[in-house]
Image: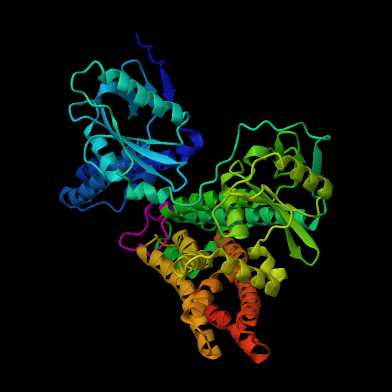
Amino acid sequence: MSVLVAEKVYSYPRRRLFWRSALGNVLVIASLFGVLYQLLRGMVTASEPLALWLRRSPWLRLLYDWLAPLPRDVSAWLPEALTTLLLAVAGLVVALILLNTFPAIRVSTRGLLIEFAGGWLPVAWGELQQIHVTSDEAGQRFVLLVIPAKTAKRLTGWHRLYGLLYGTTFQPSFLISSSIEGFDHLLNTILQENARAIRAIEHAQPVVVDEQRRSLLFGLFLRGATIETSTNIDLPPATGPDVTAFLPAWSLARLANLGTVIFVLFFGLLHYRSYWERALALLFPNLRSNPSLLWISRDPLYNAIFTAYQGVSVSFFGIAGRPDLPAPAWLLIAAHLLLVLIIVIVIALLAAMPLSVIAGQVGLTLRFLPRPLPFERLIPWTSVIACKVIDLGFGYTIAFVQSPSLPWLSRLCGLVVTGQWVPGTILIGTMKNWSALIERCAERLSHVPPINNMPRFQPAAFAPNLQLIGQPVATIVAMRAELNASGASTPSLLWTAGRAMAVVALPLGLMFAIPGLLDGDRWPHLGIILGGLGFWLAGLLEWPLVVLVSIIIHGNFDSDEEQARIFAFYPLVQMPRLLPLLLALISLIVNLPWLAAIFWLAALTIAYWVTAALWVEVYEWDGTQVILGGLLPVIWQLFVMVAFWLLR
């Protein structure tokens, strides 16, 4: 007699579902909003008395202006309505797929219950036919496609889309990710219960687990290094009390961090307010003479609109046929997109550097805001991937703590420090009790197994992205030795270099695209995205141009392999530019172009500094050659900068 399986619901952590759910819900709301808008336009177009009543009712006039300009007649409205309906259907289909891609799964005595559109669809244990498996290189993360037999009729036609998305079948199927809570137990239950069920079915075959039927799409998502953190390690008791380290109230690092956050908040909210003021001035003519809004009339564009619409409000969706002119609807949408960006920037800045740290028995408690503001995070010692003590030169030291338990937006800090999209935060060496903090970290992490033969605590870590600024030549020598010792092939080195240069050039494209898309004075258009792509490609083009010119100037090489290694080395040396370029991007988002120009010039200064050091090491240049070689990326970037400000 077999033991019946206990009923249990397996679901995904909320943080895994948030962005997918948010995007799906936005698509649903936008689709329904578009249909409602067109329906109202059609009703008002078809009924002249209704249109007259809306125009004459003061409290409904805003609704009429929002629907304007109306089509001439119903026949002119039908094509618009049909287009909106098709877009709404597409949006709802995409939302349905997103919201149900990785469903919760309920195990019952008879089989599985698959969550779909708020309900549950049954799949019997004996109906399971195949499981296609896609895993990462380390075999730690998986995406499974579970395919019931064709005789199983309970899944919907929509579930065929998941097989197409996976890329191996058109049969109705569903997806399971290893990020679901209790993944191993769920998979074992499926295999065991399927084996038990088919024993009672004549000629039935057990479910086939096929690891060769991989998904190209999900394989791309699972690419990259996977680091496994141990959570079931019992650490011995600490040898002393908890160690508390903190930045003094008037510490330069503390003032710079909090000052930057306050600066971004202040100017970002001022910019956000300007969107509202412009939208209100367009909608309500009597506000245009308000003293606090007179600055809008000084803008030639708005002055021309106010002159043409004296005493009349502009339509909520703008002037018909003029997407290049401001529309209240887009001003308000752009304002709130800007607000979201400001919040993201503020959280990323705060997560980059905690103000105080408590090294306790179970982990590090990081506080990112002064008390009593609530923003702290406990990082268990077992989840600390690395604690790297880094000498920046000039007597300055920091520690970089890398852990998946950190806030998600701390990955921006990890990108600046390591050049990789990893979560990390910086501890400043000027903290009080710094030596005791480092000793406690070393003691606690000594009890945690290393990862890939690398100890969790590294007292003298190598971080070229930061050390290149203070010790450029020595850092380049160490980077070159590390590159030669790696034994990587030339194509692999060039691929790594290409990714690094793509990251360095990315802020250039974002500096053009994001402020352009959020410009409330015109509707966004494809040209802005193409322009951003163009500036990103211009940043990438610097790599072959500068290296080729340097090779021509130098002239003598023993082998093509040596030239290829210089090509592979150049982008890695340019990574310190990333921080000032990201600060320039933030400055443009909060509408401070003059500050963005200063940060961009700072990035050019760093480019000169590290490139000159590169030529000193690889070519042994000196004097005029070093100066000219260091100016090569600066000259190219100045051309890019001039084009940027002319086209912006």
Relative to 610, 280 lies left or right: left
Query: What colouring style does the render use?
Result: rainbow
Residue at the (63%, 58%) spot, across then down: 417
Out of 418 and 494, give the one closest to the viewer: 494
Task: Specify whether residue 65 is painted magenta.
Answer: no
Relative to 482, 516 lies left or right: left
Q: Is residue 215 above or below residue 616?
A: above
Out of 123 and 56, give the one closest to the viewer: 123
- Asked where in the image residue 295 lies, by quadrant, the reply is bottom right
Q: Is residue 618 above or below residue 373?
A: below
Residue at the (51%, 72%) spot, across then down: 568
Q: Position of residue 162 (x, y in %)?
A: 29, 40
Does the image show residue 497?
yes
Does the image show residue 60?
no
Out of 565 and 260, give the one closest to the viewer: 565
Residue at the (71%, 42%) spot, across then down: 445
Q: Position of residue 382 (x, y in %)?
A: 64, 38
Q: Which residues are magenta?
A: 312-329
Q: Position of residue 228 (x, y in %)?
A: 55, 42
Q: Position of residue 488 (x, y in %)?
A: 50, 65
Task: Specify whether residue 327 is painted magenta.
Answer: yes
Outermost residue to the top: 1
Magenta span main SS: loop
Relative to 106, 605 lies left or right: right
